[in-house]
Image (cartoon, rainbow, N blue to C red):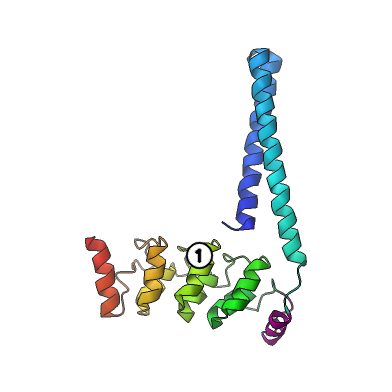
Amino acid sequence: MNTEQEMQQVKGRIAEVYARRERLKRELETGGLAPRAGLARLAETDQELSALDSRFKQLWDAAQARAKAEPSPALAVWLAGQGLAHCHARTDTGMTPLMLAALKGERALLEELLALGADPNHVNDDDHHALWFACVHGDPALLALLIERGADIDNVNVNGVTCAVYAASTGKLDVLKCLVEAGADLSKETSGGYTALDSAATLPVLKYLRSLVVA
């Protein structure tokens, strides 16, 4: 889970706990709760709310610090070479620096972009995200890094194709194994109704996927 995802989760919890707090106050006011028990529960709820507020502030401050962070000279030069003004810029087809770094296999740049707050789940105009482009490049180490940082393994593009279906259809067995080990859903179908097994392009991929079905 990345910072943005956790912030949304904490924000939702704050709303839930605050609503619970308001219900407790109403029950106390109307006599629905005994004063001692009601006040104790209200105090516990206030503590929980305070802890959530503190966590949200920590996440917010961290996100703001990353947003203000300057790229290294190497990353700045690379961004300029891609025609991108900053770490969160996009090309005319919606490609982000993270997607381009994944596509080109630039691990060091990928790590720095993630540290600067690049979202691994942003998608381009075809609904491809950075993990898809790491699959295209073919280095399982890049996949593992992006998955560790919260990339959606089962993201689908405009044709309903997942990374696992792509890997199977292009014969990239090492990439497919990495996705499966990380929990990829092999039952997902494309908009044409094809699964990864249906899309297997080579005999090694077909044997691997069949072995999973048998297992």
**Residue 139 in picture, x, y percent from top left:** 46, 78
**Residue 166 in picture, x, y percent from top left:** 41, 74
**Residue 125 in picture, x, y percent from top left:** 57, 72
* SS label for mark 1: helix
Q: Residue visible at 62% across and 41% down? A: 13
Q: How many marks?
A: 1
What's the magenta region?
A: 73-86
**Residue 198 in picture, x, y percent from top left:** 29, 70
Residue 81: say if magenta: yes
Quadrant of the rendering where the C terminus is positioned: bottom left
Question: Dividing the picture into quarters, in which one does residue 207 lie?
Answer: bottom left
Amino acid type indicated by mark 1: Ile
Q: Residue visible at 65% across and 28% down? A: 44
Main structural element of the magenta stretch: helix, strand or loop?
helix
Q: Residue visible at 45% across and 79% down? A: 138
Query: Can the viewer see residue 95?
Result: no
The residue wearing badge 1 is: 147
Question: Dividing the picture into quarters, in which one does residue 110 lie?
Answer: bottom right
Q: Residue visible at 35% across and 63% down? A: 186
Residue 9: say if magenta: no
Furthest-bottom residue in view?
81
Residue in front for this viewpoint, 46 or 11: 46
Position above or below: 182 against 139: above
Quadrant of the rendering where the N terminus is positioned: bottom right
Position above or below: 39 against 99: above
Question: Dividing the picture into quarters, in which one does residue 69 lie?
Answer: bottom right
The crowd level at tag 1 (other Cα within 10 Å; few <14, some 14-19, many 20+) is some
